[in-house]
Image (spheres, rainbow, N blue to C red):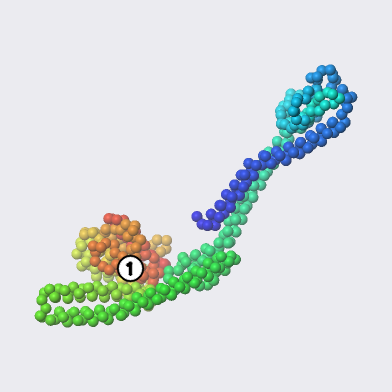
Amino acid sequence: MKIKHQLAIFNALTRLLVILILWLMLPILVENVVYHHINNTLLEKKKKFIEHLNQEEINDFIENPGDSTETFSEFSTLHSEFLVLSRVPIQPHQKKTTFSNEYRKIEGEESEYRILQHHFTYEHQDYQLEIGSSLSEVNDLTFVIKLFIIIVFVVILFMTFLADTFYIEYLLKPFYKIIDTKIRRVNEPETFDHTPIKAASRDFRELDFVLNQMMDRIAEVFKKEKQFISNVSHELLTPIALLKNKLENLLQNESLDDNAVDKIAGSLRTLDMLKKIINNLLLISRIDNNQYEANEEINLQEIVSDLQEDLQDRIEDKEIQFENRMYNSFVFTGNKTLIHILIYNLVTNAIKYNKPKGRIVVEDGFDQQHYFISVKDSGIGMDESQLEKIFSRFARISSDQEGQGLGLAIAKSIASFHHIDITVESKLGEGTAFKLWFQKAN
């Protein structure tokens, strides 16, 4: 998941958590505000009632003053409010004024009320005053408020999520541009683009600057390494040639016994192997330094046919069945010698690591408008650990086989030089398939 999506989701989840907390607290907040307002209203009504109260009014309210249980009740037409005055003795330590929510039945209709209970004494007589205000409308209003607020919260959450997504996309645009233009498309330090990236954020400008500096240092190190390999290889070829010439002259001496001849012959084979390694390193160095021209028209079908003829003896020695399924006449521009080496190394590897009486299939085709060549064998195959280092220099699939471990490193360098992608699939004990992917189908 990209960082912009992670940030947007994190912000959305944070807001969702805040909304959830507010939603849980909303009933308490609404009740406090509403009940505070109702309580103040009831206290005002109680105050007015007590201020204008006299014995005559009490006698009017309570028709039978001798009956201590007699009460007087008054309620509005819509039953939204009521007032009850009763003769009730005041208990010790009883609060003078209290508020409560109770259900009351008035004329057969039961509703919930916010009730103020006030105990007072008037002319040595204890009274209880109850003033109630209906909560039905308040509950309806509270539900509407909750519904409205949750809708507003959802809209805000959605809008802020979109805003965060687009804003984060805008902020991270230089970051993705750095990845795309300065990292992903760079195969070699020499092709690195040093053009500064325009960014509103100072962090990305600093990242771009540091990345340019780092690539400059890497390019310098690569250049020195390639030059060193080239120089050392050239310098080593001369003493090797001299040693080989002296050993070959020694072999002409008839006074040498068979043991000495065998040792000299072994030394010559070692020198030949060393010379081959140096020539391969020189080849890689020259390819990496772009010292080859790439202006020849190459027909891959012809190259595979020529290779089949050249390697026929080695194929027959291992009784391998070679199938040439090159049916497309694909022509592209490059270096014919290097392409020949590339395919030669893949085919010789397929022969070397194949089983006796095995099979090699070389075929071509098109996949999503891209031309490819596949070299598949039925050999020993490779596991994941071997596949990870298969294109490294001096890496060998099996210690039992001859070779210096430079064939596939050379193949990788040639493929990169021609902008060819090379992929490999392999299963241990079943075989290996190399594929060369060309950029465009001509």
* Residue at the (53%, 67%) spot, across then down: 207
Q: Percent position (x, y) of residue 344?
A: 29, 69
* Image side of residue 94 versus residue 185, left or right: right
Q: Percent position (x, y) of residue 196?
A: 54, 71
Would residue 362 be seen by someone viewing this image from the given angle?
no
The residue carrying pointer 1 sits among few (fewer than 14), some (14 to 19) or many (20 or more) residues within 10 Å by Cα, namely: some
Q: Amino acid at mark 1?
A: Arg
Q: Where is 252 relative to 155, above or below?
A: below
Residue under pointer 1:
393
* Image side of residue 101 versus residue 11, left or right: right
* Residue at the (72%, 40%) spot, across then down: 33
Furthest residue toward front: 92
Would residue 67 be seen by someone viewing this image from the given angle?
yes
Instruction: Give 304 or 57, whichever is nearer the viewer.
Output: 57
Instruction: Give 116 or 403, whichever is nearer the viewer.
Output: 116
Q: Quadrant of residue 229?
A: bottom left
Q: Where is 292 relative to 301, above or below?
A: below
Q: Percent position (x, y) of residue 254?
A: 10, 80
Instruction: Give 141 or 204, whichever is nearer the viewer.
Output: 204
Instruction: Give 6 or 301, whichever is nearer the viewer.
Output: 6
